[in-house]
Image (spheres, rainbow, N blue to C red):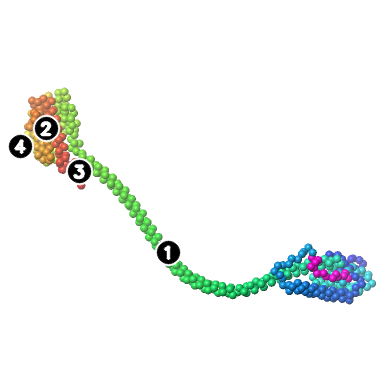
Amino acid sequence: MATSTVPSSKTTTHVTFVCQKCTRPIKLNRSLQAKDLVGVANTSEERLSLEWSGQAKETNKADQEDGTDGEASDQPVPIPRSSPQVVRRQFPRRSSETVSVIYDSLQPNHPEKKSTLKQIQIASETFKMLSSHMEIDHPLCCDCPEAVLESFEEKIYSMEEAKGHYDRLATRLEQEVDTYKSEMSELDSELEAMHKEEELLKSKLLETENRREKISSEMAVQRDREVKLKVEEQAYWKNFNEHQQRMLIFKDDLISVQYQLQYTTEQLLRLKKTNVLNCVFHIWHNGHFGTINGLRLGRLQTVPVEWSEINAAWGQTAFLLSTLARLSGVTFQRYKLVPYGNQSFLEESENKKRILPLHSSAGLRLFTDSKFDSAMVAFLDCLGQLKRHIETNSKPHFMLPYIIEKDKIGDPGKEGFSVKTQFNSPEKWTKALKFVLTNLRWALTWVAANSVSMPTTIDSN
């Protein structure tokens, strides 16, 4: 209901009822009285309740006649949506005078103003009562109730369809419950078996926990042992590395010593094979001359050798004979040999004052120098004593190549050459001196091979 006020000299109130569905204004039928409106309201309410209850009874009766007894089948029965008028409940049409009451705006100068206002008040209360008892708001126009009824029929249809589905689901659930009840004994036995298995598993779990605690304690002990072993391992590898380092050093030293030993052994073998006397006193020849350390011993008319060279050669020869006698343990009789370089000489044992010089500076008077000749004869005598010592003590027998008789030296069975210069030719004298050097070379070889007291001999031990 809407109320509007129009400004004028006197206040005028317009009361208008509006359809609650389409919002069009409606007017009240003037022929209705207040008691009629109340009766209409009561009658409408009773008729509506009776109609709905009667329709519900008819629905239940129809279901029973179909043999369903309110229970849904296993499969839902589809309801055709294309023709809802077939299954839709048919309700009696309500007249516009009873349900949809038409009103018009009241005229303020109406002669029955008081009664009209009373009618309006009663109509308003009636509409409120109807709206509170139903889901439809009142008032309604003549065209809207049909549309409202159709919407309610749609809702009723969908709710009945849902109810059918719920009934079928309830029936299915009851069947499943019956099935589960039949299986309860089997399930109870399975549950009991599962309880026993649970107890067994609990006991095994407890045993496993105890074992786990023991293993944990043992693992703690093993971890401590592992730490100790790691410390020992580190110490071991440290000692091992130090030992390996020392071994490498010792190996290097050993290899160095082996190489030194090999070198020393080779040097020893070479020195054993080396005749030191040959190195110190190198006796060779140069044409007709015999040489000692490169010094020629002798003199020819065609090759006038300087006396300084001859004297130096005699000094090396005297030094060699003295060395060989000392190494072989020979002591000369009648003479004492004194090596003194190019001033070497000999002394007579019985008369030490007599000196026999083994050098000369006579020049052209060479062959008239008697003391020089006596010294060379005395030297040849000492060489003869060494020759006899060697030949006597050599095993197997060893002999010097040239024989010595007084002042001569030469091949056996032949006339020797005198070492004197007097009454002798330079060629023969030079030949005799060459034989002297040859005998000295052979004596040197024997002494080097048989003497153990030689300073050049190296003891292998």
- The secondary structure that dominates the magenta segment is loop
Q: Find the magenta span and give its range.
A: 84-97
- Neighbour tally class for label 1: few under 14, some 14-19, many 20 plus, Cα within 10 Å: few
- Quadrant of the rendered structure where residue 322 is? top left
Q: Which mark is residue 458?
A: 3
Q: Is residue 22 left or right of residue 385?
A: right
- Tags 2 and 3 in contact by the CB under 8 Å rule? no
Residue flagged by tag 1: what amino acid is it?
Arg
Residue bearing mark 1:
223
Instruction: Say what amino acid the circle numbered 2 marks.
Output: Tyr
Q: Is residue 116 left or right of residue 190?
A: right
Say how many tags the image has: 4
**Cα–Cα gap, marks 1 and 4:** 105 Å
For mark 4, does the 10 Å Cα neighbourhood hold few (<14), some (14 to 19), or many (20 or more) residues?
Answer: few
User: Mark 4 — residue?
Assistant: 350
Q: CA distance from mark 2 to mark 3?
A: 31 Å
In the picture, measured across the screen, residue 5 lies left or right of residue 171, that is right
* Circle nearer the viewer, 3 or 1: 1
Asked if the residues shown at circle 2 and circle 1 are in contact, with their CB atoms under 8 angstroms apart, the answer is: no
Residue at image location 93% in from the left, 73% down from the top: 112
Question: Which residue sits at x=8%, y=36%?
Answer: 335
Image x and y of residue 55, in percent: 80, 73
Q: Find numbered disc 4 in the image and state the secondary structure of the residue it sits on.
A: loop
* Direction from residue 148 to residue 356 in the image, left or right: left
Q: Is residue 94 magenta?
A: yes
Q: N-terminal of the two: label 3 or label 4?
A: 4
Three-letter amino acid code at disc 3? Ile
Whether 11 is among the magenta residues is no
Q: Earlier in the sequence, mark 3 or mark 1?
A: 1
Q: Amino acid at mark 4?
A: Glu
Spot the residue most to the right: 111
